[in-house]
Image: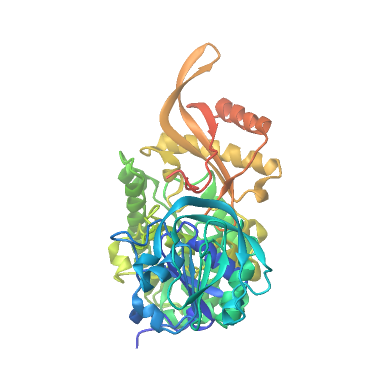
Amino acid sequence: MAPNTEGEAPHNNFDTILVLDFGSQTSHLILRRLRSLGVFAELLPCTTKIAELTWKPKGIVFSGGPASVYDEGSPHVDPAVFDLNVPILGICYGCQEIAWRIDSKNVARGEAREYGHADVNVTKVNSHVDRLFAGLGDSVAAFMSHFDKLISLPKGFVVIAATKNSEFAGIAHEEKPIFGVQFHPELEHTPCGTDLLRNFSVDICGAKPNWKMGDFVQLEIARIRELVGDRALVLGACSGGVDSTVGAALMREAIGDRFKAILIDNGCMRLNECDEVKETLGKHLGINLTVVDAEDLFLSRLEGVSDPEKKRKIIGSTFIDLFEKEAIRIEKEAENTPNSGKVEWFLQGTLYPDVIESLSFRGPSATIKTHHNVGGLPERMMNGQGLRLIEPLRLLFKDEVRAIGRQLGIHESLVNRHPFPGPGIAIRILGDVTKERVDIARKADHIFISMIKEAGLYDEISQAFAGLDTSRSVGVFGDQRVWGYIIILRAVRTKDFMSAEVFNFDNAFLQEISRKICNEVDGVSRVVYDLTSKPPGTIELE
């Protein structure tokens, strides 16, 4: 019998709110808010066919989105969603979707855009519809972001909130638990947003707020054991980052020495990275890490490639080529030992932001980038051929993974380590990758991170690194003019890595870093600091 991959999925063990994504850049924040309440939430494209769902949600949220609901080709939900007989909350576009489905004339382009702060006046109806705004008072501050608006009240609905520009800022069905709001409760700029989402998920949907990391760990260990079985071996990609480290700790807890940890040195690692990771994992987790030197292979395959998506695809494919070779070696070494068996599974520390950013939800979040550990994998793995993927952290955000790491007793230096992308420095070089450019970026990055640590700022920053722009700039060193590379420094603060703000260094500190890099790293003539938040930028340069 095939192992049950669904059996211990969180939505089968915890009351779950389903968020249907219409392409909003803040859809993930709805999940974050709900999970912070102890209510598990999962995100799927708005085009999901309800008949294909293997589980029933306690309630459904329609997210916002950039389209106009009345335009041809705009995304719409499967009508069967309304036959599930579970509560529904539409947010912005999601609210318009509810109204448009009843009568397309209910939604039209507004006369004035409504972006930013708005005072929402709550209307009491003295029926079940009052539950959404229960306990929030007569007026709430909210964040609006829309041009289209409801111009008439859908049949069977009543008004539960209004603003100066939107007389239907909140609506609810008179009999069914279907609600819509034109503002965004998921944003921090809507202070009462968490309370409203609690009213919906706990009080209206009846979801139990019992989503806890401790329960997840035990359920995931049980799921891993069922998936892997008694004999199979698992190969794991370990980079020393918190994601792969927590994944490795979970796997070791589940199957012991049948888990084999591998670090592939693709020639684009940070300074002394491989030696430090091997020592740290062995010392703190008892994991015997095998390091495979593949610098020449990766750099040869990346030669002349400047397109970032092609880089990720090449790196992802090469990683798997090498892991499959390692699987053969491990199987041979395990013959005639208690751990003999076939390497059937490949562990990755994929997180929910990786999944969200790599998949094109039509409706209609365009793919921001392909993560090497999601979209960069060869089709043979995605289709279940050869090594099969096992991703225990796939539905978690970074802060949830760190919470698991602490629960598993992983050392704080590993739990709080800044993320490092699988492709490494290759995607921190704007242009094609050469050994010289990797060495320059590596040295600059080491200086930047070392100075941040010395200043006591490392734990205040979520991620920091130095990248390299292959466009060159004229510099003057002594009496000589040089034609050197540009180093780009990046440092951000974020809770979930789906959005991020630039870390504000003191200018004198940045000048000190710039001087040190220019003086000590040959080939550099200029250092700049990236002031772009996410969005519109991504955290990594490529």
Percent across and percent down for residue 80 are: 35, 80
**Which residue is rendered at x = 36% and y = 51% of the image?**
312
Circle count: 0
Q: In the rendered image, is residue 401 in sight?
A: yes
Percent across and percent down for residue 138 are: 67, 67
Q: In the rendered image, is residue 497 in sight?
A: no
**Above or below for 272 versus 506:** below
- Furthest toward the bottom, the residue is 1
Camera-side residue of 439 and 39: 39
Percent across and percent down for residue 257 are: 51, 73
**Which residue is rendered at x = 46% and y = 70% of the image?**
153
Residue 495 position by quadrant: bottom right
**Which residue is rendered at x = 62% and y = 72% of the image?**
133
284 vs 252, left or right, is: right
Percent across and percent down for residue 147 are: 45, 54
Q: Quadrant of the N terminus?
A: bottom left
**Above or below for 465 versus 88:** above
**Above or below for 388 versus 537:** below
Q: Quadrant of the C terminus?
A: top left
**Which residue is rendered at x = 60% and y = 79% of the image?**
202
